[in-house]
Image (cartoon, grey):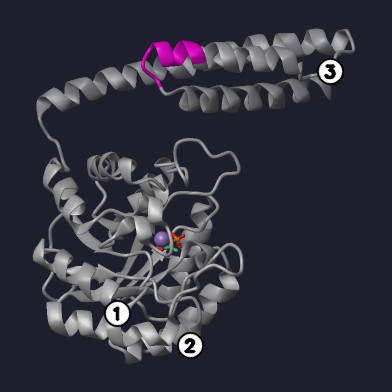
Amino acid sequence: MELELQPLNLAGVEDKRPLVIAGPCSAETEEQVMDTARQLAESGIKIFRAGVWKPRTKPGGFEGNGLAALPWMKRVKEETGMLTATEVATPKHIEAALEAGIDILWIGARTSANPFAVQELADALKGVDVPVLVKNPVNPDLELWIGALERLNGAGIKRLGAIHRGFSSYDKKIYRNLPMWQIPIELRRRVPNLPIICDPSHIGGRRDLIASLCQQAMDLGMDGLIVESHCNPDCAWSDAKQQVTPDILEYILSLLVIREEIQTTENISALRKQIDLIDDQLIELLAKRMRISREIGQYKKEHGMTIVQTSRYGEILDKRSAQGSLCGIDQVCVRQIFEAIHEESVRQQIEIINK
Ligand code: PEP
Ligand code: MN
């Protein structure tokens, strides 16, 4: 389904990269909301975010102030002139948020992973003209993300945007949520006019990662940033480790280098030719590797051996990821490449064995 989109068209917000949305993870108290909002407005932020209803992994945590926080958001609007944004997860949330004059709604990662929930939200939005931002589902499933956008679009929501907040993984490394940049890049290719906003706070999970993630998002051509900012981050009731003060946010934004999106210089096209050449060689080499792998498959078949020899596989992954890191390529990336190559090798050997 082709999405029928309109620009977000946000009143009072300049149409330039990056579109910045900032504010605390949660609206905790009226003072915290107003204090943070005033500071953000002073540093030029035009859109204020705060979670009014908070999805929590386990019961017992702070689940948001709900309806009580909506008048605070209204006050932010009236006293600072900023637009306001919050997460909605049920039709009731939508109704209350719209009634309180919230300008932008977003659908959280846990909700966008559930087609039933998204459809209920879409139905509740029929006939309403409000910008809706859809966070990627917690699992790395581009179709599910696009599906959520399609459901909203089907209900007549044309001012749509996507928020890239990274993907859950059991095995946590540097990031709280793996960025898997190839997924938002593929989203851009599939739905070219859809604004994509990066959420470095939930990707990083740590405040020291925010600046570099913001820059990376800009370098990848993303349209905006949604950053968690709190007047007193260490005391935040949710996501304390990843929030930054409005001052720090201003500093991070001032350091950003916004590069031209479309490069047309001859210089670039010469370099691209080199890349194409290397890609040709990569494919040829991979094909050669697969041919040898099939010969090994034949040998294993004749000698009654199993296809996967775990120790050999582990050795390849360790050796090549270490080698990659010596050459300046991220170890995790090299591992993933070799995992994919190995998977295809195994598939080809299975074919041989079953012949
Ligand atoms: C949030 O923005 O505070 C939030 C809960 O995010 P996510 O849905 O991406 O986890
Ligand atoms: Mn949060």
Q: Nearer the viewer, mark 2 or mark 1?
A: 1
Magenta stretch, main secondary structure, is helix
- Earlier-in-chain disc, 2 versus 3: 2
- Residue under pointer 1: 30
Q: Which residues are magenta?
A: 322-329
- Residue 189 rendering spot, x and y as whole percentages: 35, 49
Q: Residue at x 13, y 42 (%)?
A: 255
Q: Which is more toward the observer, 25 or 314? A: 25
Please tell me in which quadrant of the rendered image residue 155 appears. Answer: bottom left
Residue 355 position in % (x across, y down): 83, 22
Q: Are marks 3 and 1 in contact (CB under 8 Å)?
A: no
What is the CA distance from the residue labelled 2 to the residue labelled 3? 56 Å
Question: Which amino acid lies under the numbered mark 3 shown in the image of this protein?
Answer: Thr
Task: Report the label total.
Answer: 3
Q: Which mark is residue 92?
A: 2
Viewer-closest of 230 and 324: 230
Quadrant that contains the N terminus: bottom left
- The residue labelled by disc 3 is 306
Task: Identify the residue at horizontal 11%, vertical 26% (top origin).
Answer: 266
Q: Residue furthest bottom?
A: 99
Residue 342 falls within the magenta-colored stretch: no
Q: Nearer the viewer, mark 2 or mark 3?
A: 2
Could you tell me which secondary element the residue under label 3 belongs to? loop
